[in-house]
Amino acid sequence: MFKKILIANRGEIAIRVMRTCREMGIATAAVFSEADRKSLHVCFADEAFCIGPAPAIESYLNSDAIITAARQSGAQAIHPGYGFLSESSEFAQKCHDAGLVFIGPSACVIEQMGNKTLARKAMLAHGVPVIPGSVEALDDFEQVLEESRDIAYPLMIKAASGGGGKGMRIVNCREELHEAFLAVRREAYGAFADSRVFIEKYFPHSRHIEVQVLADSIGNVVHLFERECSIQRRYQKVIEECPSPVVDNQLRQQLTAAAIRAAQAVQYTGAGTVEFLVDENKRFYFLEMNTRIQVEHSVTEFVTGVDLVKEQIRVAAGMSLGTEQAAIVMNGWSIECRLYAEDPLNKYMPDPGVIEKLNFPEGPGVRVDSGVYEGWEVSLYYDPMIAKISTWGRNREEARLRMIRVLDECVVCGVKTNLLLLQHTLQDRRFVAGDLDTHFLQEVSRSSSEDQFEHDMAIIGAVCAMIASGKKGKNRMSHDQGLWRMASKYQFWSNRF
């Protein structure tokens, strides 16, 4: 087993990995940019190394600086977390060449699964259903036009390389095709230095469901059931749950069997996620495979009791999986909400600033993963996620009601957040019924905008009433108890005037 691991990431995922390392008796080394000098993950590690200025390209994406830090620390392995270099085949190969263990699959597997056209070919060869579309990457518009003749509209143009919701356009008719092609090429080249694209059938009313898998180097592959990830904005997940409310036992068996075939097809090792699109008729299609730990892994851990990071580390150290398929069972239900410093009323734009007041919920069946604290400044340079809040219940309704309670206790002052949107979503009648698709949040956002306005007006009214009356005693409380509580809880009202 490793004696020391360097975590090539920041924020909550760096802390998450460090916690498991501590339980395993493994020392940790952190890396940080100049903007993150006072970050929690820096304090949490046994030692820390500055790797460059604030921009990610000069720090967290600087593979040479990270490998230098790993050598200086004496670490034997590097855990990449998610994002940044976690799915970089070049970084994985550099680690190998430097004599360091990359905690994840091999560089060739990352490269194969990171290229959407290569991944589609591998899945087709092993009987995993894929969305109808082009098999090869496309370089020019004539190729796109020719391939589109065999696919009914609407269709989607995607970057052949990359992910994270970048380089994607929905095309509803032939007249939109050329403009969408040019837009995707520009975005793909800017984000991934690869302007090639591919096209596939688009399903307007579909679900995004993924299967968690674990695999070791001696051929053992297990699944840890599915996660529902249809609540998204800009193709980025916001609310996830395990299991999915639409997946019955028959569909679950089919999905998990396909996910295991996908992992076996590329001789996968470590923790990975096979993502599927499920249409209105419960037909499913392979989307992609994420060759890393997922942001939403906490809901799977809640339901199965398996520490996914521990399994990643064990496999990377050459050990076999610490669990067998028969021992992995679902216990209850878990829901995760991603709390962002962003403004849902302004196209989800990030809202950087200092967190002036912070209160995270507690109680049974509650897990909060965060890398921020009161007084911490949410930076322009990185993802504005404040926390992942997860709840567990004996069933979906208990997990949902617990999450509503938890979100009601959550207080973040100084920056705008998506808290009210999360609350509204959890209480929407369609969410309660499990009637979800990938457009769900767009529809909820429209109705929650009106609620946001009414909410703000109520707070301002409460404050004005308190100022006018000058009373704060029992009489005042009984006079307008609801507004008083609202104004007391949401202390950011003062920033609204």
Image: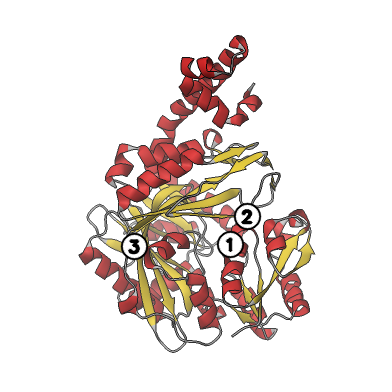
- The residue lying at 27 percent from left, 66 percent from top is 252
Q: Which residue is mark 3?
A: 131
Disc 1 crowd rating (10 Å Cα; few below 14, some 14-19, many 20+) is many
Q: Secondary structure at mark 3?
A: loop
Earlier along the polypeptide chain: callout 2 or callout 1? 1
Q: Which residue is mark 2?
A: 371
In the picture, which quadrant includes the C terminus?
top right
Q: Secondary structure at mark 2?
A: loop
In the picture, which quadrant includes the N terminus?
bottom right
Marks 2/1: CA–CA distance: 8 Å
Marks 3/1: CA–CA distance: 32 Å
Reply above or below: 372 against 352.
below
Image x and y of residue 139, in percent: 51, 63
The circle on residue 13 is 1
Reply above or below: 105 against 288.
below
Q: Residue furthest top?
A: 468
Is residue 142 visible to us here?
yes
Reply above or below: 197 against 420.
below
Front in this rendered view, residue 391 or 30: 391
Q: Residue furthest front?
A: 474
Q: Secondary structure at mark 1?
A: helix
Image x and y of residue 113, in percent: 48, 72
- The residue lying at 54 percent from left, 78 percent from top is 313
Query: What amino acid is at disc 3?
Result: Ile
- Do residues under tags 2 and 1 come within 8 Å of each other at their CB atoms? yes
Reply above or below: 127 against 131.
below
Marks 2/3: CA–CA distance: 37 Å
Seen in the image, is 266 located left or right of residue 358? left
Image x and y of residue 228, in percent: 36, 56
Disc 3 crowd rating (10 Å Cα; few below 14, some 14-19, many 20+) is some
Query: What amino acid is at disc 2?
Result: Gly
